[in-house]
Each structure stands twice: as C-alpha cells, then as structure tokens.
Image (tube, coloured by chain):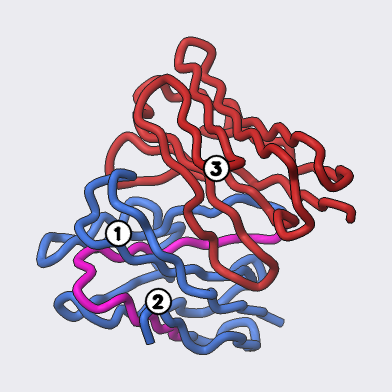
Chain colours: A red, B blue
Amino acid sequence: QKEVEQDPGPLSVPEGAIVSLNCTYSNSAFQYFMWYRQYSRKGPELLMYTYSSGNKEDGRFTAQVDKSSKYISLFIRDSQPSDSATYLCAMSAGSQFYFGTGTSLTVIP
Amino acid sequence: GAGVSQSPSNKVTEKGKDVELRCDPISGHTALYWYRQRLGQGLEFLIYFQGNSAPDKSGLPSDRFSAERTGESVSTLTIQRTQQEDSAVYLCASSLAGLAAADTQYFGPGTRLTVL
C-alpha cells in the first residue's frame, strides 16, 4: 500500500467552478499536510500547509485535514484558467516527505 | 538568481554511463532535498542534507545513487551505470532550516534525465 494515494485525474472544469482535490494516507504519524502546485516543466511550489487536523483558508483556496479518516482535501473556489496545473498533496512526520501522484486540473475559460 | 537552480535542464545518456546532476540552493538555506519524479508518479524522496549533519540517505534506491553537498552550498547527485528505469525528472529543493513542513521547500525546475 502506498503511503499516500491521490487520484491522478485528469480533472476538467469550467471557469468559476468549485474544485475539490483529495488524498488519503495510511501513516497515522503524519502531522504536516501540504498542497503543492506544479506547472508544466516547473518545480512544485507550496500552496498551503496545515498542521494536524482542521481547516485553513487562503484566498480562494481552503485546505482540510481529517486525521480520523486519514483524508485531506483542497478546495478551489471560483476557479480560473491560471489554476490549470498539477496539484500534489504531501505529508510528513519528520524530515521525509511523502507525495501523492498529483491531480492534473484544467480550468476551461 | 533568487531561486533554486539545477543543471543541466535536460540530459540524455546511454545505458551504463554515469551522470552527474547539480543543484544550487537558495543562499543561506541549510536544508537540501533531492527527489525523483517519474512520469505519472509522485515525487519520490531520495536524500536530505541538513547543515553539517550526516545526510538522510534512506530514500536512495540503490548503491548506484550517491549525493554530496559541500557545506551549505552546491549539491551533486551522481547516478552510476545508468539504467532505463532511472529516466525521470530529478528535482532539488532547499529550505531555510529543514524543520519539517513548517519550513517551506523551494523547488528547482528539475533535470529531465533520459536513459536510452
């Protein structure tokens, strides 16, 4: 079983839609949960991180962590064509980070 | 520049040859990570350097892989006797202090390695 599972998509939505991206994990020791955005031919960039369970909001982005279900989500409100990218979840319990495979998102104008 | 840089951006090599990939972290960042990203797969942790501490090499897939870092500067990842399954994008990231995810990792653009 992989440490982190993420649906690779691809996901295609119209501009303005609400997007929901999800990951599940198996290691209950994970404490830090992150979402990265990766544009084509670029390195990932950190969007948001959350420590332990709860919600965190930053503009149009909301990250949720449910440790009891070992499930994390990223919501994008009012999606824009510029949000088209691959979104990777990641989590850690120490110096090692475990990444999902990434979900490819396309926002259609 | 202000960001993490990697070279070369692309590398095509023949099976069995050695390759060396370079990473220049952001100045002042004590932590440096190497990852491998295969097509359609997530980032796979390879190795982690933190200051002058012994590196965490637990992610290196075989003894053909090795990495060095001089102080808190440049790092090189060496793959000996390359195999076709080594074809991937190799990403380097650095962070200020390496305190787990509380410290943002900044990624370079990666080196795309193709082994023929």
- The residue that mark 2 highlights is B4
State the CA–CA distance, disc 2 to disc 1.
Answer: 15 Å
Sequence-first disc among 2 and 1 = 2
**Amino acid identity at mark 3:** Gly
What chain letter is assigned to the residue under label 1? Answer: B
Where does label 3 land, which residue?
Answer: A59
Q: Nearer the viewer, residue A51 or A30?
A: A51
Callouts 3 and 2 on one subunit: no
Looking at the picture, do discs 1 and 3 lie on one chain? Answer: no
Indicate the secondary structure of the residue bearing disc 1.
strand
Residue at figure coordinates x 35%, y 54% from the top left: B104
Q: Residue A99 appears at what percent x and percent y?
A: 52, 45
Quadrant for the C terminus of chain B in the image: bottom right
Q: Is the residue marked by circle 3 packed among few (<14), some (14-19), or many (20+) residues within 10 Å?
A: few
Identity, as a three-letter code, of the amino acid under mark 1: Tyr
Query: In terms of depth relative to the viewer, which is nearer, A41 or A53?
Result: A53
- Seen as rendered, the residue at the extreme left is B52
Magenta residue span: B20-39
Residue situated in front as seen by the camera: A100 or A44 = A44
